[in-house]
Image (tube, grey):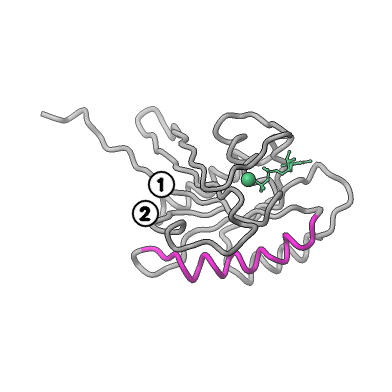
């Protein structure tokens, strides 16, 4: 019999947002628990796989898609969004433009990516670089955007300090699994 064989769920999570907000650093931090301030993005899409242990008997596999370079040129193609289960949209608290563009990213995701039942995919909003002074975005603005565009949640993060990286992903994965 194949009683011991269980299929491990695989979820595709895309990480999007303007250039230099910290997307690649976020994936690296989450998957490898490392931070490299000299990381240079390559052009294309990078994948990272993380196996998350939920309990003694249950694990899930997360396939993280990190756009590298392409975000400078155009909005993403449908191929990139295809069959994704969850989404991270990131901006940089010290870069107002990256916050303004968050709205466009969300609209782009919602127009190109829906779950089989037609609902939008769960999307979390991350306000990165909270370790830095001189913020250009205040909490009220973030709160308004989060509500208006139906994110499942938002939080400040510091990928550099490792703040709220695991917690935010856990929150997202929980919602993804509930809806699955
Ligand atoms: P991407 O273009 O969105 O993939 O951004 P990167 O991950 O390449 O990061 C761009 C720059 O921001 C790099 O120099 C990172 O070291 C830096 N960075 C990323 N996250 C943080 C953070 O939380 N705090 C600070 N101070 N710098 C960060
Ligand atoms: Mg990058």
173 drawn magenta: no
Identify the residue under disc 2.
180
Segment colored magenta: 95-115
- In the image, what residue occupies the spot 57% across and 47% down? 43
Sort mark 2 into few (<14), some (14-19) or many (20+) by Cα contacts within 10 Å. few
In percent of width and height, residue 146 lies at 65, 64
Mark 1 secondary-structure assignment: strand
Q: Residue at (38%, 56%) from the top-left corner?
A: 83
Q: Is residue 108 left or right of residue 127?
A: left
- Which quadrant of the structure image shows residue 10? top left
For label 1, the residue is 11
State the residue at coordinates (63%, 72%).
Answer: 148
Q: Where is residue 87 in the image (x, y as percent from the top left)?
A: 52, 54
Residue at horizontal 55%, vertical 47%?
Answer: 66
Are discs 2 and 1 less than 8 Å apart at CB? yes
User: Between residues 175 and 42, which one lies in front from this camera angle?
Assistant: 42
- Pointer 1 residue Cβ closer than 8 Å to ligand 2: no
How far apart are labels 2 and 1 at the CA level? 10 Å
- The answer to whether 123 appears left or right of 148 in the picture is left
Q: Which of marks 2 and 1 is nearer the N terminus?
A: 1
Quarter of the image with the N terminus in it:
top left
Please name which of the two marks, 2 or 1, marks the residue nearer to the observer.
Answer: 1
Residue 11, x across and y down, in percent: 41, 46
**Position of 68 relative to 142 (above/below):** above
In what element is the residue under mark 2?
Answer: loop
């Amino acid at each position: 019999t194949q009683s011991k064989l269980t299929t491990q769920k695989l979820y595709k999570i895309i990480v999007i947002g303007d250039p230099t907000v910290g997307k690649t650093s976020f994936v690296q931090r989450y998957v490898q628990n490392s931070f490299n301030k000299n990381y240079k993005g390559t052009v294309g899409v990078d994948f990272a796989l993380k196996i998350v242990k939920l309990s003694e008997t249950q694990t899930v596999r997360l396939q993280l898609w990190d756009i590298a370079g392409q975000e400078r040129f155009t909005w993403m193609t449908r191929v990139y969004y295809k069959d994704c289960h969850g989404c991270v949209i990131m901006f940089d608290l010290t870069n107002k433009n990256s916050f303004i563009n968050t709205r466009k990213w969300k609209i782009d995701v919602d127009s190109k990516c829906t779950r089989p039942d037609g609902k939008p995919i769960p999307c979390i909003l991350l306000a990165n670089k909270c370790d830095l002074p001189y913020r250009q975005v205040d909490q009220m603005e973030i709160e308004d955007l989060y509500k208006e565009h139906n994110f499942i949640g938002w939080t400040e993060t510091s990928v550099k300090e490792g703040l709220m990286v695991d917690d935010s992903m856990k929150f997202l994965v929980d919602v993804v699994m509930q809806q699955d």
